Amino acid sequence: GIYLASTGYIQVRAFVSDAQIPLKDVAVNITDASRNSIAMRLTNRDGQFDVPIPIPTPDLSAGQQPNTGIFPYTVVNLSARLENYEEIDVDNVQVFPDTQTIQELEMIPLSEFPDAWNKVEIFDTSKQNL
């Protein structure tokens, strides 16, 4: 495996669609690439975690060798849930060493989709060309 010598951080910003009003008590589950849980937190009244979540990452130099298949980031997945809002899944979020990644979570009230009580919005973040 890859030695995870560094740490990056993930923070969220949960808000109600167009108005961008922060949402409190959004349950955010962060998992690794194999869907193993890393952390679960609730957002505060600012729609963020009280403290960013530390994520083990490879050292930045690990991804600087060409054609090794090693990338200088760790991939995590996020799921966000709040009663009466559409569930959000964000896959393949890239967390870089010594960097805070901020993932925006635009929560849509289910009242905007009366027939979609179990609708899940899935976002997949594509790899960066490094």
Image (spheres, rainbow, N blue to C red):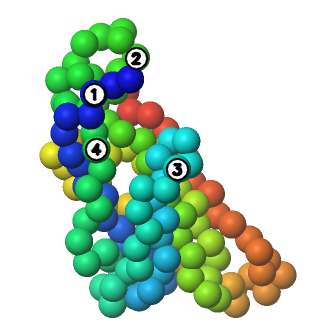
Dividing the picture into quarters, in which one does residue 60 lie? top left
Left or right: 35 as drawn, with respect to 13 = right
- Which one is earlier in the sequence, the residue at label 3 or at label 1? 1
Q: Residue at x 51, y 41 (%)?
A: 33
Estimate the spatial distance between the alpha carbons at disc 4 and disc 3, rounded to whole Å: 14 Å
The residue pinned by badge 3 equals 36
Mark 2 residue type: Gly
Crowding around mark 4 (Cα neighbors within 10 Å: few <14, some 14 to 19, many 20+) is some
Q: Position of residue 47 (x, y in %)?
A: 36, 81
- Which one is earlier in the sequence, the residue at label 1 or at label 2? 1
The residue pinned by badge 2 equals 69
The residue pinned by badge 1 equals 3
Mark 4 residue type: Pro
Please say if 35 is above or below 21. Answer: above
Estimate the spatial distance between the alpha carbons at disc 1 and disc 2, rounded to whole Å: 14 Å
Marks 1, 2: nearer the viewer:
1
Mark 1 residue type: Tyr
